[in-house]
């Protein structure tokens, strides 16, 4: 079904004449995070009438751009949630629902609330329209008593409930596409708002194969997120990464250009990343000039709490990776070990608190000349 307005389902756009809600978030951030905006969580109580027919509830701004998206996947009504950021401005937003293809998406209630920046005197402002609640952060001074404002049938009142930020999570892994020419790796099953990382491992005899490029991006970043090479040491090896945020539940496969002797490409998806702008906070790269079994992919410094760290390596051999470790990360888990012409291995782990973190390491079953990259995904 096409996306419709939750408040007035005859409208699918937000303008001065549609029933969008105005949120003034100018006073609800800190100087250090002003550029990021205000962290928010969108809660949705909903269900889909057909199994695996994924739809979504989205928050759009007055230009029609999607700022937050909550995928609805189950046939039983329950709460779904996604974290993101909204600009620290006075702006108008609206809520739409739809995106599924087979059945009906039923939305019973949703709540948009900020979190993570509230101090001792701060609360959450909540406005209700029937069963629909839209919230914005508010400050209650000690000498002013309770905070309450009514606009027609809409009542805004202060509460003390604050949600906690959570790291993005691994969602699914697609089928790799390898060969000696162009490749087109398919997306795994995904929802609107999921972030995909396309990893490309390449090899060229006698020289650096150069960074991978996309001849048909299909929404993926045309600029490289991160890239590492072992060129200059005889045969050349590279691993390159690109990203894309799903705007439908049936994203088309990108095409990696033919500029290499051998290639492997694969898409891995994550849920709960920041809903707008680049999901990549920082990245780093490492190269092993000679063959060995010890992989070490450098760390960096995250700009906020609950970032998900993605560490990936590429090489030409059939070695498998094991013993992934990083003392600075929580629940580090291998998500890719794929040998299709070239080999790609990858593990992910959460960085709970903002700040520096060290290298992510792994052990290969036999010596390889590997290249590695690290990406930090923002919640």
Image (cartoon, rainbow, N blue to C red):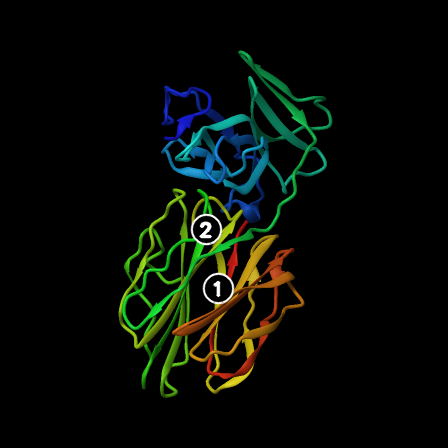
Q: Position of residue 32 (x, y in %)?
A: 56, 49
The reply to whether callout 2 and callout 1 are in contact (CB within 8 Å) is no
- Tell me if 148 is positioned left or right of 88 in this view: right
**Cα–Cα gap, marks 2 and 1:** 16 Å
> Farthest top residue?
152
Instruction: Identify the residue at image location x=38%, y=74%.
Output: 341
Q: Is residue 376 visible from the viewing direction of this image?
A: yes
Q: Nearer the viewer, residue 133 or 254?
A: 254
Label of residue 151 in the image: none
Label 1 secondary element: strand
Q: Is residue 94 visible from the viewing direction of this image?
A: no
Q: Judge depth for marks 2 and 1 and give the one in front.
A: 2
Label 2 secondary element: strand
Q: Is residue 8 above or below residue 177?
A: above
| Structural crowding at the residue carrying mark 2, measured as other residues with C-alpha within 10 Å and reported as few (<14), some (14–19) or many (≥20) | many
Q: Nearer the viewer, residue 322 or 288?
A: 322
- Tell me if 281 is positioned left or right of 186 in this view: right
The residue indicated by pointer 1 is 283
The residue indicated by pointer 2 is 195
Q: Position of residue 93 (x, y in %)?
A: 45, 29
**Which of disc 1 and disc 2 is earlier in sequence?**
2
């Amino acid at each position: 079904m096409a996306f419709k307005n939750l408040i007035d389902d005859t409208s699918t756009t937000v303008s001065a004449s549609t029933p969008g809600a105005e949120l003034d978030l100018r006073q609800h951030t800190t100087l250090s995070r002003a550029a990021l905006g205000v962290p928010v969580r969108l809660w949705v109580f909903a269900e889909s009438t057909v199994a695996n027919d994924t739809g979504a509830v989205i928050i759009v701004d007055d230009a029609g751009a999607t700022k937050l998206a909550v995928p609805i996947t189950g046939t039983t009504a329950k709460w779904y949630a996604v974290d993101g950021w909204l600009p620290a401005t006075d702006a108008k937003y609206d809520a739409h629902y739809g995106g599924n293809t087979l059945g009906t998406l039923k939305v019973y209630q949703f709540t948009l609330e900020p979190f993570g920046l509230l101090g001792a005197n701060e609360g959450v402002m909540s406005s209700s329209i029937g069963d629909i609640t839209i919230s914005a952060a508010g400050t209650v001074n000690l000498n002013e008593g309770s905070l309450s404002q009514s606009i027609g049938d809409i009542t805004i009142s202060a509460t003390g409930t604050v949600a906690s930020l959570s790291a993005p999570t691994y969602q699914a892994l697609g089928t790799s596409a390898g060969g000696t020419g162009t490749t087109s790796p398919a997306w795994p099953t995904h929802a609107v708002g999921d972030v995909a990382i396309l990893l490309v491992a390449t090899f060229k005899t006698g020289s650096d194969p150069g960074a991978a490029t996309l001849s048909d991006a299909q929404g993926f970043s045309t600029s490289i997120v991160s890239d590492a090479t072992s060129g200059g040491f005889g045969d050349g090896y590279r691993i390159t990464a690109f990203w894309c945020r799903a705007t439908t539940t049936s994203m088309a496969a990108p095409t990696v250009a033919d500029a290499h002797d051998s290639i492997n490409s694969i898409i891995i998806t994550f849920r709960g990343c920041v809903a707008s702008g680049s999901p990549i906070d920082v990245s780093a790269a490492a190269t092993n000039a000679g063959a060995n079994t010890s992989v070490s992919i450098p760390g960096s410094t995250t700009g906020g709490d609950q970032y998900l760290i993605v560490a990936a390596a590429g090489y030409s051999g059939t070695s498998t990776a094991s013993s992934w470790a990083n003392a600075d990360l929580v629940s580090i888990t291998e998500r890719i070990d794929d040998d299709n012409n070239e080999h790609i291995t990858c593990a992910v782990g959460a960085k709970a608190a903002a700040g520096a973190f060290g290298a992510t390491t792994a052990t290969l079953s036999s010596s390889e000349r590997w290249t590695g990259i690290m990406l930090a995904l923002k919640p």
